[in-house]
Amino acid sequence: MLSWEELEKNCMECRNCQLCQTRTNVVFGVGPRDADIMFIGEGPGEQEDLQGEPFVGAAGKLLDDMMSIIDLGRHNSYIANIVKCRPPHNRDPEPEEQDACIGYLRNQVALIKPKIIVCLGRVAAKRIIDPEFRITKQHGTWDQRGGIWMTAIYHPSALLRDASKRPETFDDLIFIRKKIRELKLRILDADGNRVY
Ligand code: URA
């Protein structure tokens, strides 16, 4: 396992797959490096590639709103992606691209030691929870592995495309809140006051 400094340096200089040829910025991840909760998306889009930060475009605004419903935000949760460089035209990252990149995420998880991982959408859920994961049927279900509770919710981009999925996602968020309480996690707001 690499230290944060080595990991970030390697990731920023990475040329392990073809996505390095078209990226503007590597999107490493943001948030406290000791967060109890991680949100994991699939890969940077256009805005993320330009700004070097995950979930800063339209889907990111919705993710911020979703997180704030249960008092979560970038100040108390770590946000990262399966692949750190933008797949051209926002296509799904290819399996070889995921394979080339997943070590960075594994190292991030090993350093952060989160108690809960929330996968955002199908690509992350298949890669992290189960290759056979069906997001339409299994969103909001929980698995525990290596001491980490894992769940998946619809990707905010899917909720922008299809608002009819939003009520189910609201329920899933409430279950995340329930899990945070069950696990007695200590989560702070942006001012350092305890919200859980
Ligand atoms: N979609 C993702 O999966 N990740 C981002 O960072 C932005 C959009």
Image (tube, rainbow, N blue to C red):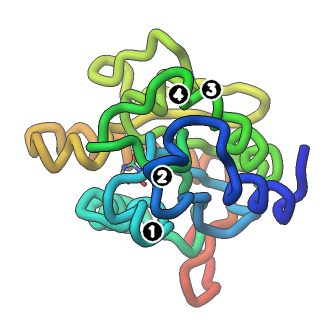
* Spatial CA span between label 2 and label 4: 13 Å
**Marks 2/1: CA–CA distance:** 9 Å
Give left or right: position of 12 versus 66.
Answer: right
At label 4, counting other C-alpha atoms closer than 10 Å, the crowd grade (few under 14, some 14-19, many 20 or more) is: some
For badge 1, the amino acid type reads: Asp
Tag 2 and tag 1, C-beta contact below 8 Å: yes
Residue 19: percent from left, percent from top: 50, 42
Residue picked out by circle 3: 99
Residue placed under numbered mark 1 in the picture: 71
In space, the residues marked 3 and 4 are separated at their CA atoms by 24 Å
Which element is circle 2 on? helix
* Number of residues whose C-alpha sits closer than 10 Å to that of mark 1, classed few (under 14), some (14–19) or many (20 or more): some
Q: Is residue 178 visible?
A: no
Q: Residues under labels 1 and 4: Cα distance?
A: 20 Å
Element at badge 3?
A: helix
Q: Residues within 10 Å of mark 2 (few under 14, many from 20)?
A: some
Q: Nearer the viewer, mark 2 or mark 4?
A: 4
Could you tell which of marks 1 and 4 lies nearer the N-terminus? 1
Residue 148 occupies quadrant: top right
Give the residue drawn at x 61%, y 84%: 193
Is 14 in front, or is 98?
14
Q: Which residue is mark 4?
A: 142
**Quadrant of res 30:** bottom right
Tell me what residue is drawn at x 77 percent, y 33 percent.
147
Is residue 105 in sight in this rendering? yes
Disc 2 marks which residue?
177
Q: Amino acid at mark 4?
A: Trp
Residue 152 placement (x, y as % from top left)? 44, 34
Nearer to us in this view, 191 or 94: 94
Residue 109: x, y in percent?
73, 45
Circle 4 sits in a helix, a strand or a loop, which is it? loop
- Circles 1 and 4, Cβ within 8 Å, touching? The answer is no
